Amino acid sequence: MSLMLNSGRAMPTLGLGTFKATTPGEVGSAVRAALQAGYRLIDCAAGYGNQPEIGDALTEAMASGTVSRDELFVVSKLFQTHHAWDGDASRCFETLDRTLAELQLEYLDLFLIHWPFGFAEAVLEKPPGTPQPLRLEGGSPNPVFTIKMEYTQTWAAMEAMVESGKVKSIGVSNFTREQLEHLCSVATIPPAVNQVELHPYCSQQELVKFCEKESIRVMGYSPLGSSAEHAPTEAGHRLLEHPVVGEIAQQRGKTAAQVLIRWGLQRYGTNLISIPKSSNPGRIEQNFHVTDWELTDADMERLDQLNCDFRYFVSYLKTPSNDVRWHDGVIETGTESDFVTTGS
């Protein structure tokens, strides 16, 4: 199954996520298993640190005849360290060339701005040679880095990437409605996709509705929730372990993961692309078999009622002294107020 993007290209509605697959051999094995199971969409990112291994697996699969390049749909993301900064977009093009080299591809099917924030630092080391964590414990961005809201100059660079033929479609990730509206007001090429966290705890109904109205497809990451121990107070359980999910899975003869993936595809069938992540070959195959059956209306209603707007992933506006989990209502304005932190 596929959806047509506003760029005129078809995109599979189910793919493999590769976030946090960093153990040597893990992501390569996952990609091989996914391609054997029938997946054709692979979601990558420079920030995940595993693209070279994905590139090896893709090259091997194409050489063996498992899949052709035309059948693949490969997504990557421009990380915060490579946004345009103070009018200089050179590092945007540098990261695209590095991504293509790592993935061993001549072009990307879709390239996304990973977050609407950019870092002054191209390398996460301060001082040089001293690696620093991207975030503090609790999710706040590390204050040693200089971070600002930035995406319009970076978008202009990505439009040039489309003109070059190195990228077929462009989009964004973790953008709010307000940011999409602002971006569309200055863009020559509208974003084809917005990739956001989406699952029954965070159903994103209004954002999905807006995106569909504007012909922007939604990619839902973390459809299974997260392996993190924290969970919304209202629910008291991690999503995969919620009793409602388990009961429906047992009644339908499916796994909890299959139920959650099916919920998203059925809830937003005309505008959602789902990218569950797994490194287990058996689960990867199970997760692919979610399109030839349906949840009942009663099942969907029970799962819909789990929504509490709970996010596992937090905004770069989060600091140790606040509980700002997201950046609703905040757009790039091009002033000093855009700075989130000014590192030293």
Image (tube, rainbow, N blue to C red):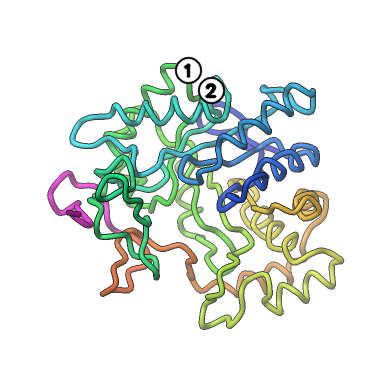
The label number, if any, that marks residue 77 in the structure image: none
Which of pointers 1 and 2 lies earlier in the amino acid sequence?
2
Residues under numbered marks 1 and 2 in contact, where contact means CB atoms less than 8 Å apart: yes
- Residue type at mark 2? Tyr
For the image shown, how many numbered marks are present on the structure?
2
For label 2, count other residues whose C-alpha is less than 10 Å away and answer few (under 14), some (14-19) or many (20+).
many
Q: Residues within 10 Å of mark 1 (few under 14, many from 20)?
A: few
Could you tell whether 194 is left or right of 343 in the image? Answer: right
Amino acid type, callout 1: Gly
- The part of the chain drawn in magenta is 329-344
What residue sits right under mark 2 in the picture?
A: 107
Q: CA distance from mark 1 to mark 2?
A: 7 Å
Q: Is residue 238 left or right of residue 119?
A: right
Taking the view exactly as shown, the residue that stands out farthest to the left is 336
Quarter of the picture containing the C terminus is: bottom left
The label shown at residue 165 is: 1
